């Protein structure tokens, strides 16, 4: 336990170190939600760039914006945002495959049995369209249409989730304006020294000699992990044996003619995968690769060769390692974002992890002193998030038949975590998804990736065999038609975006 | 071809509502299968069968087999139970209540946080249970249709109704246990390897005496030696009576045998949670319906989720003993020296800090009930909720008083 210098009853002095997406989201979150509990100072240096490639988000971001009372249209305009209904995966299970992992469910349960069991039965007979036809989100994505979901969660024609694709280099400034208007103090400067007593950071010193004291330090310094990693030396838990990609090269390009996709695309590549994120004013692209399987030059060349518009900048390289600090909160330092760990953005989880850390910090916010119970409660919540996302990402690599490169041979044959092996075995044998109700990626997400990458169970719930085939096919057909009709009446994504402007 | 063939035959052993509800649900799920019930005497300590109560979280299991709460209430099979009341069970001796449905809500923030914030002012604040419509209605002896009640089920009428549905649906009643693809042990008898909950739920003996209780709530009173409770039709006292051994089976589903109800988990008499747990297990079984041949992975998944469900209920019930309320009397004094499950320690530590309830999967109890049990016993978090700090105590007190007044006048949304 560490006593706070200025005793209880006063506001906690929070110092956020680093001003990228994580830093400004955290500063805004604390200033917006805990104005009576803390003061927030953010230290950043304009000389240090931000990673800012987290351009694709998950629907949870909407809750963050809503909770802070941020207007969606203003946010979308400021960040050149488009709507996002899911992620299209190409060439993952095998070259030529494609599927969309939507934000939402497939069909609806029948007689208490999940929809996918019935689908599995009739798909084996070749009698039904791909499972995406039973998702309004997938269907709308395929047709480049968008409309806000309906209110009834049990209506499969209007229930789906959505998120945003935006320019991350504009999101941080947007949140900065919002946070500064609510009292966050910004200090320009580079940190040259960290003053600490055991695991308690007392102050940071900037390059101009000024000293900034605080009670709670939020490390948003990105990969450098200036406080948690460098100053407190929190051990690193390495996951690169499961997630070997350790580099990325990113380049924006001009938007091609034609409709703007309301989805992100992830295309498997010989040594990793590439992203394509359509924004309003450009398209974000990047190749995430394993340096042991492709050189920087090869990766850049492959990225540039695949652009569908003129490159708008020089390719930018990033280095990272999959894994995390053992604890995200140690002493009076809480790491948020890349300073706490890194999981590649294959499922757009970077900003989600920032948001999850902010939510957990608000729930375990130290008042007066940092107690072990604050730290442990926070760390338990974050552990669960990291572990679940990790397994879900590994699935995308492991569930493949690709044998066309050393990279895919490695990930296809590697030993996976027991937690994932158990989930896969349960699915293969019974069509059941190992369930949890708190955290990211619930049953429909697992079903999407399993089926999308060719992991088809040998058996399904025997109750799905009960309905007579003809009647079942008619019911499934009319459900797919109802979704198709409903989606056909939605405006095109570009029209929905134009309406915002 | 489906590699998983459906069950052809199910045998259900047991003579109480747990066996019958299991048989009916499985027959409806598998109309083509032979489902046979082998009646057996209900043991004295099979409390799920003897004193069935269904919390709102498991009503949909009953509804799925054609027994929605409205029907059970209309037919006199069930009576509404809105809350539980606890006397002499808190630090300062003040009575408290726990609703089976949720508390009211305020747009200004989390209700417990605002209630605690209001206490920071100098004004007197209504008790937390005054913010729960179910508690207020129950205390007034009113059954308010806007509150979803727990169902106090008459075991005899319930068994009759279930047996009638079972017969109509083609369930057979037989004398000897037949060979079956799956045998469900709903006998209430304890077999196999168990995890002991005596420290978490210290209740070794309990006596039952008929009594003319008919309030729409269960009333508990702590005594030096334990507690006494008035449930509809019966008064329950810890001490001389039947032996109870709280605990759960480590692997209730193994091979072709699945234990359910008291044969799988014995949560003790406090809160009479046994039947709710049985229905929770039944919901799990219906979700993970096994195939004809034993599937170890599916069984492991069932057992994993069963354990989460049972242990979470254990922790909720254990809060009544270990939640920092009454300390007087040998029974309560002894509690301090008993070890607690780590999950309960974690939960209590997080609540003690700032009133958060650590969430968990397979939850059968309303979040507001967890809070009510702890606040009721007098466990006041040491730190305020940081979000609620933005609401001045005077304003929080006004909001809480106004809400309590609206609820007292029975003015609240369904």
Image: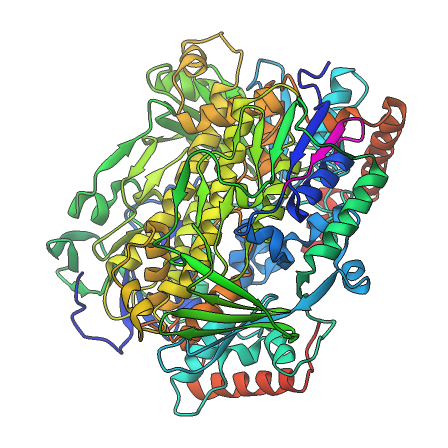
> In this view of the protein, which residue sits in the foreground, B2 or A380?
B2
Q: Position of residue B230 (x, y in %)?
A: 56, 72
Q: Is residue B308 above or below residue A205?
A: above
Q: Position of residue B133 (x, y in %)?
A: 63, 76
- Which quadrant holds the C terminus of chain A? bottom right
Query: Which residues make up the magenta segment?
Result: B29-40
Q: Is residue B214 left or right of residue A353?
A: right
- Which quadrant holds the N terminus of chain A? bottom left
> In this view of the protein, which residue sits in the foreground, B378 or B257?
B257
Q: Is residue A309 visible?
A: no
> In this view of the protein, which residue sits in the foreground, A309 or B201?
B201
Judge whether residue B204 is colored magenta: no
Q: Quadrant of residue A104?
A: top right
> In this view of the protein, which residue sits in the foreground, A345 or B138?
B138
- What residue sits 25% from the left and 71% below the top? A368
Q: Is residue B132 left or right of residue A342?
A: right
Q: Quadrant of residue A197?
A: bottom left
Q: Is residue A441 visible?
A: yes
- What residue sits 76% from the left and 43% below the top? A156
């Amino acid at each position: 336990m560490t006593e706070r210098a200025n005793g209880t009853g006063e506001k906690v002095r929070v110092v956020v170190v680093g001003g990228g997406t994580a830093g400004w989201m955290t500063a805004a979150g604390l200033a917006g939600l805990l104005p009576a509990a803390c003061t927030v100072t953010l230290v950043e240096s304009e000389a240090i760039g931000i990673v800012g490639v987290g351009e694709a988000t998950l629907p949870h971001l909407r809750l963050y914006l809503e909770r802070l009372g941020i207007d969606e249209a203003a946010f979308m305009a400021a960040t050149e945002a488009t709507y996002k209904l899911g992620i299209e995966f190409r060439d993952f299970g095998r070259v030529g495959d494609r599927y969309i992992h939507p934000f939402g469910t497939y069909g609806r349960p029948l007689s208490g049995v999940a929809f996918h069991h019935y689908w599995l039965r009739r798909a084996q007979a070749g009698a039904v369209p791909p499972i995406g036809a039973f998702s309004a989100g997938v269907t709308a994505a395929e047709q480049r249409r968008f409309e806000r979901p309906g209110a009834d969660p049990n209506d499969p024609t209007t229930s789906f989730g959505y998120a945003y694709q935006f320019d991350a280099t504009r999101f941080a400034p947007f949140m900065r304006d919002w946070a500064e208007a609510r009292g966050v103090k910004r200090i320009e400067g580079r940190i040259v020294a960290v003053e600490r007593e055991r695991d308690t950071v007392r102050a940071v010193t900037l390059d101009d000699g000024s000293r900034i004291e605080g009670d709670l330090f939020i490390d948003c310094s990105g990969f450098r992990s200036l406080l948690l990693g460098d100053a407190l030396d929190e051990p690193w838990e390495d996951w690169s044996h499961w997630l070997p990609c350790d580099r990325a090269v990113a380049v924006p390009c001009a938007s091609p003619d034609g409709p703007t996709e309301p989805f992100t695309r992830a295309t498997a590549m010989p040594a990793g995968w590439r992203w394509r994120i359509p924004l309003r004013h450009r398209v974000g692209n990047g190749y995430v690769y394993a340096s042991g399987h492709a050189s920087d030059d090869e990766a850049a060349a492959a990225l540039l060769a695949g652009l569908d518009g003129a490159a708008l900048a020089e390719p930018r390289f990033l280095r990272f390692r999959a894994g995390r600090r053992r604890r995200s909160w140690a002493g009076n330092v809480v790491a948020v974002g890349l300073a706490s760990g890194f999981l590649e953005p294959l499922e757009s989880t970077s900003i989600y992890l920032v948001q999850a850390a902010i939510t957990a910090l608000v729930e375990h916010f130290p008042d007066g002193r940092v107690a072990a119970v604050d730290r442990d409660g926070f760390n338990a919540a974050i552990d669960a998030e990291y572990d679940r996302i990790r397994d879900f990402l590994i699935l995308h690599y492991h569930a493949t038949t690709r044998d066309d490169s050393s990279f895919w041979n490695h990930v296809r044959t590697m030993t996976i975590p027991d937690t994932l092996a158990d989930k896969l075995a349960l699915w293969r044998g019974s069509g059941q998804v190992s369930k949890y109700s708190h955290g990211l990626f619930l049953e429909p997400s697992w079903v999407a990736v399993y089926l999308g990458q060719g992991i088809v169970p040998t058996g399904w719930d025997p109750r799905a065999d009960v309905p007579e085939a003809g009647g079942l096919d008619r019911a499934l057909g009319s459900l797919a038609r109802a979704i198709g009709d409903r989606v056909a009446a939605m405006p095109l994504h570009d029209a929905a975006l134009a309406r915002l402007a | 071809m489906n590699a998983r063939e459906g069950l052809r035959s199910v045998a259900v052993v047991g003579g109480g509502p747990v066996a019958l509800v299991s048989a009916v649900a499985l027959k409806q799920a598998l109309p083509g299968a032979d489902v046979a019930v082998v009646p057996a005497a209900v043991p004295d300590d099979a409390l799920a069968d003897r004193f069935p109560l269904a919390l709102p979280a498991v009503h949909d299991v009953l509804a799925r087999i054609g027994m929605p709460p409205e029907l059970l209430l209309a037919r006199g099979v069930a009576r509404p139970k809105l809350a539980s009341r606890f006397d002499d069970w808190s630090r300062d001796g003040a009575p408290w209540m726990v609703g089976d449905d949720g508390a009211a809500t305020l747009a200004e923030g989390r209700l417990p946080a605002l209630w605690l914030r209001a206490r920071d002012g100098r004004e007197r604040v209504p008790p937390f249970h005054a913010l729960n419509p179910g508690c207020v209605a129950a205390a007034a002896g009113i059954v308010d249709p806007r509150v979803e009640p727990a169902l106090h089920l008459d075991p005899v009428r319930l068994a009759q109704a279930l047996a009638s549905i079972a017969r109509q649906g083609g369930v057979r009643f037989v004398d000897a246990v037949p060979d079956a693809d799956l045998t469900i042990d709903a006998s209430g008898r304890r077999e196999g390897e168990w995890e002991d909950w005596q420290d978490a739920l210290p209740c070794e003996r309990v006596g039952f005496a008929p009594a003319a209780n008919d309030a729409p709530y269960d009333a508990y009173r702590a005594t030096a030696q334990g507690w006494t409770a008035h449930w509809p039709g019966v008064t329950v006292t810890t001490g001389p009576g039947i032996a109870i051994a709280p605990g759960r089976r480590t692997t209730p589903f193994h091979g072709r045998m699945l234990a359910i109800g008291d044969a799988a988990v014995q949560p003790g008499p406090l809160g009479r949670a046994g039947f709710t747990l049985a229905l929770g297990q039944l919901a799990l079984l219906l979700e993970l319906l096994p195939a004809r041949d034993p599937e170890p992975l599916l069984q492991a998944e069932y057992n994993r989720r069963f354990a989460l469900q049972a242990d979470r209920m254990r922790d909720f019930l254990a809060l009544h003993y270990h939640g920092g309320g009454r300390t007087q009397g040998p029974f309560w004094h002894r509690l301090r020296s008993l070890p607690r499950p780590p999950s309960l320690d974690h939960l209590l530590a997080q609540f003690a800090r700032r009133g958060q309830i650590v969430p968990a999967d397979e939850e059968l109890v309303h979040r507001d009930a967890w809070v009510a049990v702890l606040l009721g016993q007098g466990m006041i978090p040491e730190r305020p909720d940081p979000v609620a700090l933005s609401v001045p105590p005077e304003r929080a007190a006004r909001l809480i008083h106004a809400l309590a007044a609206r609820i007292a006048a029975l003015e609240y949304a369904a």
